[in-house]
Image (tube, rainbow, N blue to C red):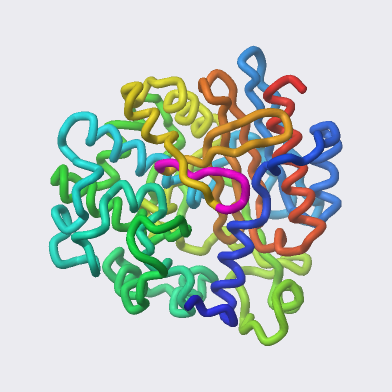
Amino acid sequence: MRRAASLITALVAAVLVAGTATAGAAAPAGLHDEVGRALAAGIPGVVVRVDDGRRVTELVRQAGWTRADHHLRAGDEFRMASNTKTVTATLALQLDAEGVLDLDAPVERWLPGTVPNGGAITTRMLLNQTSGLFDYLDDVRALPLLTGRTTDPWTPADLLAVAFDHPPLFAPGARWDYSNTNYTLAGLVLESATGRSYESLVVDRITRPLGLRDTYLPRDARFAGRHAHGYEPDPEHLAPLFPPGTPVGDGFAGPRRHDHVDVTGIDLHQAWAAGGLVSTARDWQRFLRALMSGRLLPAGHLAELRASVPRGDGHGYGLGAVEVHSPCGTVWGHSGGFPGYRSHHYTDPTGARAVTVLLTTTYDLARPEAAEAQRALVDAAVCRMYGR
């Protein structure tokens, strides 16, 4: 059972449910209106980039109180969080196509003695989130890492040890459940199969060939270039967002700003293959368009990436990519959220068009009006991409 009373579980739940394009919803209002609505709902900053295949539209807005820290721009670096999973899955599919990795072989082959029941769990199950392994972020021990209240280093082995302290949620392959544990393991599988570091695989196979100059795996909390500042509610404003008795404690580490905390300095590079990459809206759109148009994978393996399993919310999860049915059409991509950084990145099924929505908060989105504003903004951006 997951620890429903812990702040960590409440925060993770907020990341997963707040703001994916809404299946079956009515068409949203205009994009400019939805950006304004997001700011009015208390979201500190918004960047939207829409490439409809003919022209690029960029919209940037931020709350006045954030300007003393940073003037937000469309090209600012941003923590990609779980969008990283799409890169990890792409690497695995490339290696499978080359015969270096077999996605249907048990992970025990690559990581002997590491994973409980590793003989029954395949790399494909890691990538499509059907392994049944407990998510280490659902354990309260991960709370200081997520809130920046610890400077102790966390290795993949440390995170996996937390996950493996819990029994599996279900038998391998029985159903879908989101777990960062899966992608930390996938990163280790990639390294074992190739004898190379995850970072070098990203550089040699993704960022260098595509010319992604602002996409990288940091080694600490520092950004390499100009970057967005991220914000979360201070403890007094965080506590009311969650059920009574949820242990908010001292909340997020960082300087206080207008009922918020500037969480830009929280070190989350430990997310690694599950969520560690930094990028920009332009870079990530270039990656996703290359992926979905077939430049990075053979046709058969791109079809495998898109072979989705139901998530239970009307959308499907493939191999590191989400199939989203928006009011204006189906899109493929992913979303992700860490303290201060929430983002959505999608393309049309051909990779000809792309859309990105960046928000400089995640846990403000636990407020219903902010969550609804986020959903409407993502839908509006997708509709603009489709010219509707």
Residue 338 visible in the snapshot = yes
Does residue 321 appear left or right of residue 249 in this picture?
A: left
Q: Nearer the viewer, residue 108 or 15?
A: 108
Q: Main secondary structure of the magenta part?
A: loop
- The percent position of residue 314, horizontal first and vertical second, equals 62, 46
Residue furthest bottom in the image:
245
For the C terminus, which image quadrant?
top right
Note whether 317 is above or below 341 in the view shown: above
Does residue 271 appear left or right of residue 237 in this picture?
A: left
Residue 209 visible in the snapshot = no
At 62% across and 76% down in the image, what residue appears?
A: 251
- The percent position of residue 78, horizontal first and vertical second, equals 55, 46
Q: Nearer the viewer, residue 63 or 339?
A: 339
- The percent position of residue 179, horizontal first and vertical second, equals 43, 60
At 61% across and 31% down in the image, what residue appears?
A: 330
Residue furthest front in the image:
174
Note whether 227 is above or below 287 in the view shown: below
Question: What span is colored magenta in the figure?
Answer: 312-319
At 79% across and 49% down in the image, what residue appears?
A: 373
Does residue 304 appear left or right of residue 333 in this picture?
A: left
Which quarter of the picture shows residue 133? bottom left
- The percent position of residue 46, horizontal first and vertical second, equals 71, 44
Q: Report if residue 20 lies within the magenta region.
A: no
At 42% across and 27% down in the image, what residue appears?
A: 291
